Image (cartoon, grey):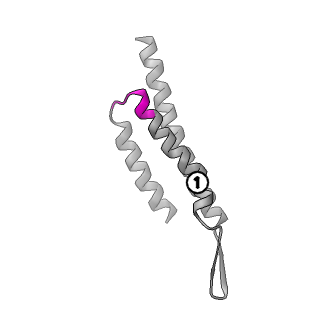
């Protein structure tokens, strides 16, 4: 499940990065992934009880938060590269 969610998010980010953007648009994208990274641990329950079973999802939640962080870092990297390129021009 997390692979599918991450794959969709990665595709959306790739589409965003294929286009030229101004600094404010990059900042909005960074904020979006930063918010996801910080909110995911609070949105998802870490332990789910189903009848007599308990499902512990700490690792799943951590993977989702880490994926959001990785996406944010991709945006920051591209933003930095664009800024450096513009400064050299």
**49 above or below 62?**
below
Residue at the left extreme of this rendering: 19
Task: Report x, y in % for residue 42.
Answer: 62, 59
Picture layout, residue 2 above or below residue 79: below
Task: Give the class, few, some or many, for how many residues have Cα within 10 Å of label 1's Cα (few <14, many ≥20).
Answer: few
Residue 14 in the image: x percent, y percent?
A: 39, 43
The verdict on residue 31 being magenta is no
Identified at 54% across, 47% down, the residue is: 35
Q: Nearer the viewer, residue 37 or 14?
A: 37
Note whether 83 is above or below 60 in the view shown.
Answer: above
Residue tagged 1 = 39
Which image quarter is the C terminus in? Answer: top left
Where residue 67 sits: x, y (%)?
Answer: 55, 51
Secondary structure beneath dot 1 equals helix
Name the residue located 65 percent from the left edge and 67 percent from the top edge. 46
Q: Which residues are magenta?
A: 20-26
Image position of 66 with respect to 58: above or below: above
Quarter of the image for residue 85 reads top left
How far across and how far down the image is residue 8, in percent?
41, 55
In the picture, measured across the screen, residue 59 lies left or right of residue 70, that is right
- Residue farthest to the top, as pictured: 89
Residue at 65% x, 62% y is 59
């Amino acid at each position: 499940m997390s692979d599918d969610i991450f794959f969709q998010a990665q595709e959306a980010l790739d589409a965003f990065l294929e286009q030229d953007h101004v600094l404010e648009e990059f900042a909005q994208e960074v904020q979006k992934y930063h918010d996801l990274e910080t909110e995911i641990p609070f949105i998802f329950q870490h332990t789910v009880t189903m009848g007599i079973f308990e499902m512990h999802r700490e690792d799943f939640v951590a993977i989702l938060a880490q994926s959001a962080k990785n996406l944010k870092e991709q945006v920051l990297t591209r933003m930095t590269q664009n800024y450096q390129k513009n400064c050299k021009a």
